Amino acid sequence: MPSKCSILALFVAGALGALASPSFEIGPFYQQKPAYRAVRPFYAGENGEIDVLWPVFTCHSDWWRFLYIVNYSSYPDKEGYQFSVLPVWFNGYDAETGSYAGFFPLFGHHPHLLMMWDLDFALWPLWTHYKMPRGREWLDTHSVLFPFFSWRSDGAWSFWPVYGLNKQRESDHRYFLWPVVTWAGYREDRDTAGEGWSWMVWPIYGQVRRARESQDMLIPPFFSVARTKQSLRVRAPWPIFEYVRTPVRRRISVWPLYERNVQLDYRKAEPESTVTRFGWKLVELYDDETRVFPFVATGRGHTRVWPFYESEDEPTGFTSSRVLSLFPIRWVPAVDRNWSKFWTFYEAKSCPLYTDHSLLWGIIRWRSLK
């Protein structure tokens, strides 16, 4: 009979051998396979992305974040980086613009934030300055006590909400006691609806009369009819009823009961894709997919019956299935790495020849041939 020491030695050797193997798991708590290791719920790493108590901390080769509040990103192509503590602090470096920093709302400079370049602010909203691209030009915009006073290098200015002038490439827009009275003049432009004018006295009536477009609005935005030579849009009232007909689209919507949207091939005028919805987005019927939110989604190589079952076709040719599937969004990598194993009692991986089954986190395994 083997001694206790020999039994212990065999157990340790077996455990070390399992740990050294490419794939190994202990219940939902520990799992390893090539390029992947997880000690749930504390740690998970896959292909260079590491989670620690996700969503507390996540890092990648060129970025990391803590609670989605503290963020760091590096930009090797620009020899730069950025660090931020939302929403109060940011600093960074860019090889083109140099160092920058900001302590919101006291002061700051940022080279590119949203649609603004060379953004500067001090005691925001007291003073703000930034640039915006307009073709080959850059427009300087200043504001004092945003949004009340602003002016721009092309002559646009605003004393909101009393009066304002906004200049665009092909149009000049004005308002008086915004949004009560607004009007605009349009110059000829091949990319827009052409020369003309528009006005609106909100919430009573408005008109658009341009070379290639006309529109009438009653109690805007609830009732309107817009026409061009090739299109028609009717809202009566919006958002309850809308009908759209263009060379590339057909849409009718009776919100929230019914919607049908057909995308057309511009040259052939034939349907390319169709989606029909009932109950807003509760039931959606696509050409190759059916969704019943949040319970059923099937098509495009996947099937989901939430919260019980989920399967997905992999690029390798296998099909992965699992039970249960409690997370309401399918196949989120961070959730799969850190949490989904706790409620996944059964998994299967299938190919045309066989299916590998795993029950209770791999305690029971078997293969069935097809």
Image: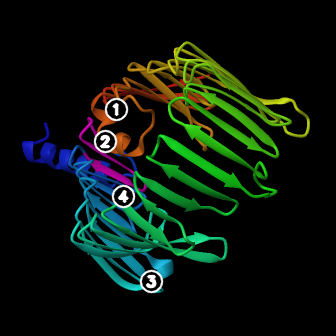
Q: Amino acid at mark 1?
A: Gly
For the residues labelled 2 and 3, the Cα–Cα distance comes to 41 Å
Magenta part, dominant SS = strand
Q: Is residue 364 above or below residue 66?
A: above
Name the residue located 52 percent from the left edge and 16 percent from the top edge: 256
Residues in magenta, as a range: 25-39
For the residues labelled 4 and 2, the Cα–Cα distance comes to 58 Å
Which residue is under mark 2?
Answer: 25
For the residues labelled 3 and 4, the Cα–Cα distance comes to 35 Å
Tell whether 259 sits left or right of 145. Answer: right
Say if mark 2 contacts mark 3, CB within 8 Å: no
- Looking at the rendered structure, which numbered label has been put on residue 362? 1
Q: Amino acid at mark 4?
A: Pro
x, y (%) of residue 336?
37, 40
Q: Secondary structure at mark 2?
A: strand
**Going by the picture, which residue comes out furthest to the left?**
4
Q: Please rate how many residues cluster around mark 2, counting C-alpha atoms within 10 Å: few if below 14, some from 14 to 19, many from 20.
A: some
Q: Between disc 3 and disc 4, whose residue precedes? A: 3
Q: Amino acid at mark 3?
A: Glu
